Amino acid sequence: MVVDIRTKSPTFGQWVSAENWTEIYIPIGSAHEFVTLEENTEVSYKLSDFYTPDHENGILWNDPDLAIDWPIDPTQVQLSEKDKSLPRFNALKDHLPF
């Protein structure tokens, strides 16, 4: 899933699914999350610059304000402790750099 987090964009706060795509380009100013539905799935991605943990942020995967239609039973979701504690979109939207 990709969420437009560019505050001046006409699609700000809207999301799109990449279901059944083998690749997707995610532009700067977009939040993204991966979900795999089969065992032994590998996801590879490239960044536009060097990874800097100090600039990393995120949005809670099941944020009700975004109402993303995830293709998975929420009880089957496996998240890192970091991802479980991410804020909701409305808590971040006034602090976005785009």
Image (cartoon, helix red, strand yellow):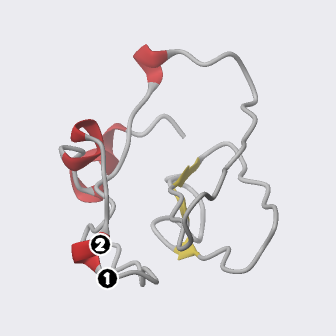
Q: Position of residue 69 (x, y in %)?
A: 42, 84
**Which element carries disc 2, helix, strand or loop?**
helix
Q: Position of residue 20 (x, y in %)?
A: 73, 80
Quadrant housing residue 9: bottom right
Residue 65 visible in the current orientation: no
> Mark 2, residues whose alpha carbon is within 10 Å: few (<14), some, or many (≥20)?
few
Give the percent coordinates (x, y) of residue 10: 59, 70
Question: Residue 43 vs residue 81: left or right?
Answer: right
Residue at image point 25% right, 57% down: 90
Q: Look at label 2 and name its amino acid.
A: Gln
User: Which of the 4 image quadrants contains residue 72?
Assistant: bottom left
Compared across the picture, whether 89 is left or right of 32 comes to left
Q: Is residue 73 above or below residue 18?
A: below
Relative to residue 26, is residue 20 depicted above or below? below
Question: Mark 1 sits on what residue?
Answer: 73
Q: In the drawing, what numbered circle is on residue 76?
A: 2
Please state if 46 lies on the left or on the right of 9 as rendered: right
User: Helix, strand, or loop for circle 1?
Assistant: loop
Residue at horizontal 54%, vertical 54%? 32
Quadrant of the image for the C terminus?
Answer: top right
Marks 1 and 2, how far apart in space?
A: 5 Å
